[in-house]
Image (cartoon, coloured by chain):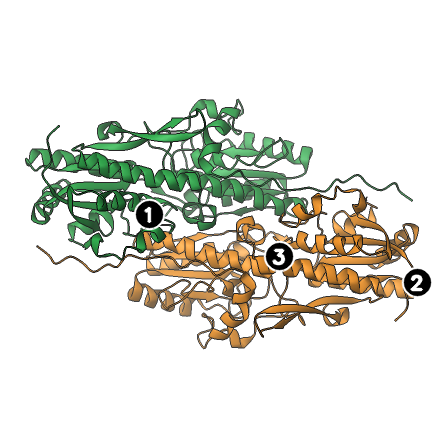
Chain colours: A green, B orange
Amino acid sequence: MTPTPRGNLIIGQSGGATAVINASLVGVVEAALEDKRVDGIYGMLHGIEGLLKEDIIDLRQQPASLWPQLRHTPSAALGSCRYKLQDNDLEHVIEIFRRYNIRYMLYIGGNDSADTAHRLSKAAHQSNYDLSIISVPKTIDNDLPHTDHCPGYGSAARFLALATMDSTMNTISIPWHYPVKVIETMGRDAGWLTVASALGKRDEIDPPHIILTPEHPFSADRFLTQVEEIYRRIGYVIIVAAETIRDEKGQALGTVGQVGTDAFQHPLLSGAAQNLVELVKQHLKLRARFDKPGDLQRMASTCISVTDQQEAYLVGQMGTLAALSGESDKMVTLVRHDQPSYHCTTDLIDLTEIANVQRLLPAEYLDESKTMVTQSFYEYALPLIGEPLPQYKRLETTRLTKR
Amino acid sequence: MTPTPRGNLIIGQSGGATAVINASLVGVVEAALEDKRVDGIYGMLHGIEGLLKEDIIDLRQQPASLWPQLRHTPSAALGSCRYKLQDNDLEHVIEIFRRYNIRYMLYIGGNDSADTAHRLSKAAHQSNYDLSIISVPKTIDNDLPHTDHCPGYGSAARFLALATMDSTMNTISIPWHYPVKVIETMGRDAGWLTVASALGKRDEIDPPHIILTPEHPFSADRFLTQVEEIYRRIGYVIIVAAETIRDEKGQALGTVGQVGTDAFQHPLLSGAAQNLVELVKQHLKLRARFDKPGDLQRMASTCISVTDQQEAYLVGQMGTLAALSGESDKMVTLVRHDQPSYHCTTDLIDLTEIANVQRLLPAEYLDESKTMVTQSFYEYALPLIGEPLPQYKRLETTRLTKR
C-alpha cells in the first residue's frame, strides 16, 4: 500500500438521490474533520459534472451546527449528476486535482458512479498522480453487488411497504368502488423496490396480491387471469408493478410515455401502471386506478428508516477512514451479522467488481408464481426498514342477530 | 326540543375515507359508552348501503383496548359507501330502525352523506318515528360550508405539503435531469388540497411554482408561458395540479383516462398530470414527469396532523352529545378561535344548509395570477396541519477561488 501524502479531500454525490444520502455525506465529513491527516475538506457541486467546471466549495467553512441537521435532510445537499465521464475528461479531472492538491476522493453513488470512480482511479495511476478514491454505496434500487444491501434502500422499502398498506386501507373502505389498484414503483432492472411493498403483508388477504418485477416477463393473459381470480376470491386486487416491466418480447409496458434515454442509455419510462389499468378496464370491465408515488419513493422524509440512516452514515465514515489509510479503487460494503441481533459492519471491495454490474433480485425471494415473495425475503429485508411497521386494528364484525 | 326516548345508537361512516375518520368514530363511541342514556351502540358496516342489508355490529362487544388503538388507524374501520339513497329506501331504513329500536344515528361523512342524513331525518319525521340524526363532518376535500374546516383536511394538507417539499428535493439534486414536475392532487371541484401543497413554501424559489385549481379555467397558452418563464429564471418548475382542472370550454384535462361517473354523478377522472406533462414535452421540449400520490393523500399514516386527529375525535364526541340531548337534522361544525392561541370549539348547523353544498376555495386565498396562494391562506391553513413542517438545511455554496 503506497503511503498517501497529506493533502486535500473532496466529496461528491452522484446518481439518483435518496432520503439518507446526506447521512453518508455527513459521515464522510465528520470522519475527515476529526482526522489530522486531512488538510482541506472540499465538496464538488453536482458531482463530477460540477468538478469539471471547478464548482468546488470548502466544507470547513460550513457552520458546525449544520452537520447534525443535514444528516436528517433528504436528498443530495451537494447536488448530484448523471454525467458519464468522457475519456478526454479523465486527464482534465486529474489536472484539476493536481491544482487543488486533492489526494482523497469520496464518491457517494451507485453502479454508474462506481464506474466513474474506477476510471478516475486508473487515470490517476497512469498519470502517476497519487490519489485515493473510495466509492460510498447509495441507491434505492439496491442493485449493487457484493454488499448485503445499499444505503437508501431501507428507507425507500419502508416507504413502499407503508404506501401499500395505507393506500389499501382506502380500497378496503369500499372495495367495490375501485376494486383494482396498481401502485407503480421505480427500481430500474431490479425488483428490489417492487417486492418491498410486501413487507407489511401478514396474511394472504393483505396487500399486495400481485407483484410484477422487471426480472420476469409480463404476460397479459396470465396477469388478467390472476387479477380475475383474486377479485372473485377477495373482492379487490392490489398490484404493485415496476415501471420497467417488459413483456415476453422485451417490449417495455411503459413505452407509452417513453421520454428518451439518460446518459447511461437507461430508458426513461412512464406509463406501466396506466397500461395495466387500461388492460383491466378493457378486458375485465373492472374499475381500476393507479398510484404513482414517483420521487416520493426516494425522498419521503416521514419514512426514513433509522437503521438505513445509521448505515448510510457508517459507510461514509468508513469510506473516509479507508481513503486516509491509503486504500483506493474500492467501494465500502455492508457486511451483515444476524447474531446476537441484526447489525452491519463494513468491508471493502475492488471497484472492478462493482462498476456497471447490477445485482438483480435472487430467485429465492419469489415463490413459484413469480408474483409473490417468500419468507426468506422478509428475513432479508425487515431488519433494513427500521422500526416495526404499524399493525392496523380491525373491528370484530360478527353481525347482530336479525330482528 | 322533543325529549328522545332511551334507545339504541347507530354509527356509520360514508364517502371517501381519511386518515382520521376513525378518530371521529372513536369520539362517537367513547362518548356513547360513557352516557347512561344509550342502550345498544351499533355500527353499520359500509354505511347506509350495509344498513339496508342489516349488516349491523354491536360495538359494545369490541375489546375495550381496541378504541385507543383504532383512533390512530387510518381509513374507515366500519367500511364506507358511496350509495345514493333512493326514495324507496327511506321507509325501509326507518322500518329497520324501528325493529332495532335505533333512536340515535351518527353519520360521519361529507356533502353527500349530509344529504343522506337530511333525507332520513325528514323521512323519520314524516313516519312519526322519533329519531335524532347528527352528521359528523369528514372530507379531505375541505368543501363543507359553515365549518371553519373539515376533519381529514389537515392530514391530507400535511401530506401534500410534505410531498411537494420532499419530491422537489429530488428535482433540485439534478434540476436539468427532469426540470419539470407535475404533482397531481385530488379535491373534486375545490382547490383546497391543491393549494395545501404550498404550505412548506417560504420564498419564491420554493415549490410549488404553479398551482392549478379546479376553480380557475386552465389555459394551455398561459400555462406554457408561465412554465417557460420559471424554467428560464430558476432552472426547474414544480407544478401542482388538481386532477379535476378544466379548460375554458369546461373540458376536463383528465378525460383521457375518464372511467365513468360515481353514484352522485361526479366524474371519475385520471390523467390531468399526464396531459400537462405531454404539453410541456411537446411544446417546450423539456423533460417532464409526474407524481400521482393518489390514495396516499387520504391515508398516509406518517403524515397525520395531531391537531386534525384531535378535532376529528372532538366532532365525533360532540355529535353523540348533541344526538343524546335531542338535537337532530344537524351537522357538527368546527368553530375556530385564534386567541390566545389556535383552538376549535364546536357548534351545530342545520343539514339543509350543508347537504349538497360545496364550499370552493375563496378568492382571497389566491393572488392575481390565480396560480399562487396569498399570505391569508397560510394563516388559515398552517394551524390545521399540526406540528411545524421541517426546514431542510442547505450548504453554503460559495465557490473556492480558482487555482
Residue A282 found in image quarter: top right
Q: Amino acid at mark 3?
A: Gln
B82 sits left or right of A53 in the view: right
The N terminus of chain B appears in which quarter of the rendering?
A: bottom right
Where's residue B223, x and y in %?
A: 41, 67
Badge 3 or badge 2: first in the primary sequence: 2
Q: Nearer the viewer, residue A292 or B278?
A: A292
Amino acid, disc 1: Asn
**Picture residue at 20% right of the left edge, 60% below the top:** B398
Give the spatial CA distance, label 1 vs label 2: 67 Å
Query: Are the numbered discs 1 and 2 placed on the same chain, yes or no?
Result: no
- Quick one: label 3, few (<14), some, or many (20+) residues within 10 Å? many
User: Residue visible at 83% across and 65% down?
Assistant: B325
Asked whether the beta carbons under mark 1 and mark 2 sit within 8 Å of each other, the answer is no
Q: Which mark is residue B127?
A: 2
Q: Residues within 10 Å of mark 1 (few under 14, many from 20)?
A: many
Residue drawn at x 28%, y 52% as measured from the top left: A79
Q: Is residue B362 visible?
A: yes
| Tags 3 and 2 both on a single chain | yes
Q: Are marks 3 and 2 in contact (CB under 8 Å)?
A: no
Chain bearing tag 3 is B
The quadrant holding residue B120 is: bottom right
